[in-house]
């Protein structure tokens, strides 16, 4: 039997109107409680700010207690809050298999770009691990930008993926680029 305490993991989601101090307020509560912030993603979408955190804490720390501690800060910031307990298999770090690449898509704004590209990649066995979109340009000439981080299936390279996406590129009249992401050893 191990002397190490069981570790509980939680997924914490916070969403609301962007303002200064959201990350500081949430992370202060987590620090005060002795939580470890394992993974996080925070971004501003239009005027909304969204953050998803994977948080851990040794037992007997419960989900309800975490929610109760974060709720006043979220209420004060006008943010919505959700906390979910993760099962051990959900909390385990998933090593990405296959070569990691960045897929960039640029073109005139039109409905269906995300769907069509995501469907094509899924059909090719490509796993999207991160996706961001932005509308840039002017109101008269909006440009849609999508950046995806993706794991290629065995045997596929950025060059073969580029060739496989060529028809979609023409159909959507967009630019699609694929480049390898070089891993960094620390």
Image (cartoon, rainbow, N blue to C red):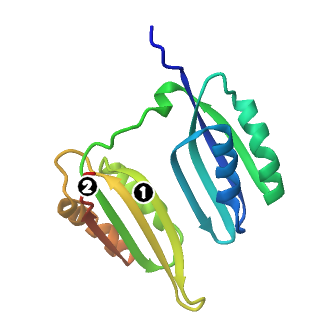
Residue drawn at point x = 28 percent, y = 42 percent: 97
The count of marks equals 2
Q: Nearer the viewer, mark 2 or mark 1?
A: 2
Q: Position of residue 122 (x, y in %)?
A: 37, 50
Are there few (<14), some (14-19), or many (20+) residues within 10 Å of tag 2? Answer: few
In the rendered image, which residue does mark 1 sit on?
118
Q: Is residue 76 left or right of residue 142?
A: right
Q: Is residue 124 left or right of residue 28?
A: left
Return the mark for residue 30.
Answer: none
Q: Is residue 64 above or below residue 172?
A: above
Q: Position of residue 137 (x, y in %)?
A: 52, 87
Quadrant of the drawing holding the N terminus: top left
Q: Is residue 72 left or right of residue 57?
A: right
**Nearest to the observer: residue 176 or residue 131:** 131
Q: Position of residue 10 (x, y in %)?
A: 60, 35
Mark 1: which secondary structure? helix
Residue drawn at point x = 76 percent, y = 51 percent: 80
Q: Quadrant of residue 106?
A: bottom left
Q: Is residue 84 above or below residue 58?
A: below
Mark 2: which secondary structure? loop
In the rendered image, which residue does mark 2 sit on?
183
Residue drawn at point x = 79 percent, y = 45 percent: 71
Instruction: Tell whether label 1 touches label 2 (CB within 8 Å).
Output: no
**Nearest to the observer: residue 117 or residue 59:** 59
**Nearest to the observer: residue 115 or residue 11:** 11
Residue drawn at point x = 49 percent, y = 64 percent: 132
Q: Is residue 119 left or right of residue 8?
A: left
**Nearest to the observer: residue 72 or residue 17:** 72
């Amino acid at each position: 039997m191990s002397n190490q305490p069981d570790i509980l993991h939680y997924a914490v989601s916070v969403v609301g109107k962007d303002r200064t101090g959201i990350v500081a307020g949430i992370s202060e509560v987590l620090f005060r409680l002795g939580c470890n912030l394992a993974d996080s993603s925070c971004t501003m979408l239009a005027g909304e700010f969204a953050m998803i955190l994977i948080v851990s804490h040794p037992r007997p720390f419960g989900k309800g207690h975490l929610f109760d501690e974060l709720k006043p800060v979220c209420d004060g910031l006008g943010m919505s809050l959700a906390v979910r307990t993760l099962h051990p298999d959900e909390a385990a770090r998933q090593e990405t298999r296959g070569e990691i690449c960045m897929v960039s898509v640029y073109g005139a704004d039109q409905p269906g770009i995300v769907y069509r590209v995501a469907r094509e990649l899924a059909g090719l066995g490509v796993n999207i691990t991160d996706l961001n979109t932005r509308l840039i340009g002017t109101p008269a000439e909006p440009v849609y930008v999508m950046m995806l981080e993706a794991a290629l299936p065995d045997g596929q390279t950025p060059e073969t993926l580029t060739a496989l996406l060529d028809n979609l590129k023409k159909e959507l009249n967009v630019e699609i680029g694929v480049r390898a992401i070089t891993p960094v050893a620390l």
